[in-house]
Image (cartoon, rainbow, N blue to C red):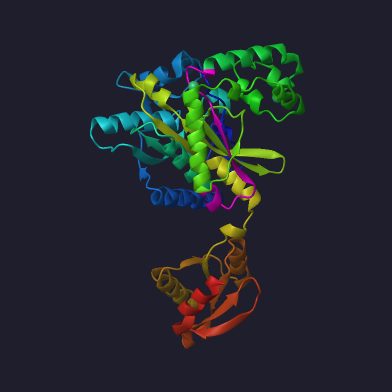
Amino acid sequence: MTKRTKSSAKGKSSSGKNSGGGEEVRDVFPQEGEVRDRIRKIACDTAHSHGFLRIETSPLDPKEAVFRVFGEAAATRELPIVRAKRKSWILRHSPFLSVARAYLAGVGKRKIGQPAKLFSEDVFFPPASASGAGSWHTSLSFHIIGGPNDPIYDAQVILVFSRLLRALRLQGAKIAVNSSGCKVCWAPYRKSLLAYYKRRAADLCGECRKGFAERLADAMQCRNDLCTEVRREAPSFLDRICAPCSRHLQKVLEYLDDLGVEYGMDNWLPAFVPHGSKTTFAAKVAVGATDYTIASGGRYDYLFESLAKRLIPSVGGALNLEMAVQAVTLQQPQRSWSRRGVFIIYMGEVAKRRALKVKEVLRESGLYVGEAFGKELLHAQLKVAEKEHFPIALIIGLKETYDDSVILRDLKSGTQETISMERVFEEIKIRLKK
Ligand SMILES: [Zn+2]
Ligand SMILES: [Zn+2]
């Protein structure tokens, strides 16, 4: 049963492409880097407050482990292989596999408790055939592994993602939930679904008609009118779901209701994690007519079975950082990401030396301080302050240097006043609070 789909990992970042040595590679430049850092911080804070502990996994997975989980299919997918000392490793291919492998190693060394609530940030490398050579993505993932097989863990992982969406202040963000069954109930359902799609192949959109047998999950999520029409009459999994899977789903939904998590059932949502079963979920953000799947996850007990020949209850989800950056920057071009701090401007060489000292004093007291000491002209420095969205500037000229004062300029209204250095810290704090 291979239910892997092209999930959120498909995200392409608009910025930061460059070409070096002929092959296209992606770098992240400061403007995007800053948005990434803010999202990272929100994810880290969320992890801490929900009791998820940081794990950092090796970027190299043993080739045998990857083949065991992804089967022979892995061999044909042009995975980036690293060879050293006659051994082969594969560059991290799935954050779920890496965390599962590390979990087994950690339990072996008695370094991980039960159940383990883990938070991980990983760069991973999708197959070249899917995203082009040299492409990489970053995932921020949350996992609960081990302990009893309890649907409360599924709900806790989904809760984390709903809190993340809220903290990111994304408009129209939705969490979709579904069950992807188990080995007992899913396989016969998939068979009947495939038979149905085979019968209706001619009615699908051009994109889905090609190789829908391998990419059934994509056809199920396709928003083309032709495909939605075909899907309307497709057999529903809820008619085939087995009793244990149905009970599990019911429990997860009850917990989510108790927690006040908003979600929608999507009966066509595929399993996003490798060897996914039972709960599957995705966090989607609509920007214009496009849905951005910024996070996805689900249960992956079977991944452990293929990796270590034993079922281990496990559920997790991953935020695709590149997708989240795209959604955030499209929805919030600058506003909420503007800097909370002051920008220091100097006029003349004498004032420059004082400005440097004032910057250090303010920075030491915990303020974020920007400057453009390389530029001499007042308007050139102001331009940088505006471009970087500072709300306040402190201007220091010769007069202010001798008076021990600064000119405090509100960059939104353009008003300014001279205040003594003694009052400057208090005054900035009051204005930043507004
Ligand atoms: Zn089942
Ligand atoms: Zn389609």
User: In front here: 54 or 252?
Assistant: 252
Q: Which of 419 and 116 is in front in this view?
A: 116
Residue 39 pos. (x, y %): 50, 49
Asked if residue 350 is positioned above or below residue 61 in the image, the reply reads: below
Residue at 60% x, 72% y is 378
Given the current orientation, which residue lies at the most extreme bottom position? 403
Residue at the spot 41% in from the left edge and 26% down from the top edge: 301
Residue 322, percent from left and from top: 55, 41
Number of residue marks: 0
- Left or right of 340 in this view: 416: right
Query: Does 175 lie within the magenta span?
Result: yes
**Residue 409 visible in image:** yes
Where residue 43 appears, as percent x and y from the top left, is: 46, 48
Q: Which residue is drawn at 57% across and 66% down?
A: 390
Q: Residue at x 55, y 51 (%)?
A: 166
Boundaries of the magenta span? 163-186
Image height check: is 205 above or below 390? above
Q: Would you place residue 267 above or below residue 173 in this image?
A: above
Q: Can residue 138 be seen in this view?
A: no
Report the side of 58 relative to 15 (left or right).
left
Whether the magenta-drawn stretch holds residue 376 is answered as no
Residue 112, relative to residue 328: is it above or below? Answer: above
The residue furthest left is 109
Task: Point out residue 282 in the picture as x, y percentages from the top left corner.
Answer: 56, 36
Front residue of this view, candidates 263 and 339: 263
- Name the image quarter holding the C terminus: bottom right
